[in-house]
Amino acid sequence: MEKFLLYFLVVCLLIQLVHSYEYLKETFNSKYLVIGVIGFLTLWYSYRLLIKPLDIQRKLADVGYKQYFTQKQWASKDKLHLIRSMMSLRKKGALPPVYPNGWFALLDSDQINIQQVKYVTAMGENFAVFRSSNGNINILDAYCPHLGANMAIGGVVRGNNLQCPFHGWKFDGTDGKCVNKIQQNDCPDDTILTKTSVKKWESFEANGFIFVWYHSENEKPSWYPPRDEMISNWTYRGRSEHYVNAHVQDIPENGADVAHLSVLHGDMALGGQYAAQANTSLWNILGNHKWKAEWKADKDQWHLSKLKLEHKLKVFKNFVIFQMNVTADQIGPGLVILNFKTSFGPMKLVQTVTPVEPLIQKVVHRVYCPIYLSLYASILLFMESVMFERDVVIWNHKKYIEKPLASKQESTLLAHRKWYKQFYSANSPTFSFRKETIDW
């Protein structure tokens, strides 16, 4: 929409200039026109770079499949159909359970307004997420127990209640109980009222995200995401959103796989998302990235682990022009808060991983910083997105190896798997793939 408005304004300006050429020639010197155009462009790009938060969105077909779209073996021109076909043929390996226990982000906080309801599917569940008139977030099962209508589609928020669009039954967001239903001629209003309810999901809002508590044994939350005060006080500078064809464990495990950093992320970020492309890029003549990493589980809190990263950008192999230290706190299976100490100042990046399907993950990054680092934070988010997409290319096609041939240097990878295993329990859902058949 913004591009359309910009183009519209430019066309209008050109038409006006043509009609008013003679008048302008007599009244104004051409240099004022040049100054005006430069001023307009300066204001526009200042808004885009310094004020408007960056928004990077990559769908499932956007990363890691481009080179396969032209292969003759794939008859369909529909990208999503092609990817689904590849997913069905790919060897999966002995996968761990697909939905671990913990807090998972369903939406960004700014994606849902007061008295608004949204439908979200994740972890094999269907959620109606709504913000009450007092601003609190509530999450209920999406389907009305009366006749099965999806209350998140067409439903109305009434105070702290969600009203079904089909017959008007209302459910309290705090406990899921039915508080009112449409009067029936053959049934008193309170006959079913006290016994009817929908599942109320535990929710928590922090650091720009709305989280839901998922546990396959229906246990209550044993911990909560921390609320970071700096994130509340700093400026929000943008987000990236990626959909990844991978097991949920692959993504946090990447932090403990310190050996892959120099191989996959050593080449300049400007070289692109494909490792082979980046390795042969002319940007590598200018410089490369140097990494040093250390991962360990927290000794005091079982659901925490910590990754320490040292990064240097070297040009012409010898000169360090940029340096940063990163401390990444892994909080449960689906949340990471990265604390950046850079050459220019501090920043924070919040990463969430949410299983949309057994092998499709939604990964969102949101970046925050002091206002004077606004431009730099946008650049960092863009560079981080490119580096992340190099991992996505690998994840989209890899097979899970239950017992990897790990060297001594990769012992942290095995330690991470042992730590992550505690988020699974006896009834955690496992992956199953059923080929569709047609029975006549």
Image (spheres, rainbow, N blue to C red):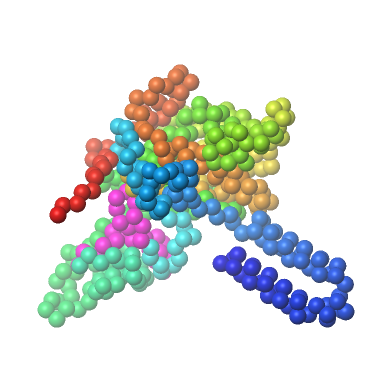
Q: Does the rendering let one see residue 69? A: yes
Q: Is residue 61 above or below residue 18?
A: above
Residue 37: within the magenta?
no
In magenta, the rendered stretch is 119-146
Residue 253 location, x and y as percent? 43, 34
Q: How many marks?
A: 0
Q: Does the rendering let one see residue 104? A: no
Depth check: 19 or 179 in front?
19
- Name which quarter of the figure residue 245 lies in: top left
Residue 122: within the magenta?
yes
Q: Is residue 389 above or below residue 154?
A: above
Q: Is residue 378 above or below residue 390?
A: below
Residue sitting at 71 percent across and 73 percent down? Answer: 13
**In what quadrant of the picture does the C terminus appear?**
bottom left
Residue sitting at 37 percent across and 54 percent down? Answer: 203
Q: Is residue 411 left or right of residue 272?
A: left
Residue 152 location, x and y as percent? 33, 65
Residue sitting at 80 percent across and 77 percent down? Answer: 21
Q: Is residue 238 above or below residue 185?
A: above
Residue sitting at 48 percent across and 45 percent down? Answer: 66
**In what quadrant of the picture does the N terminus appear?**
bottom right
| Residue lying at the far left of the rendered structure | 186
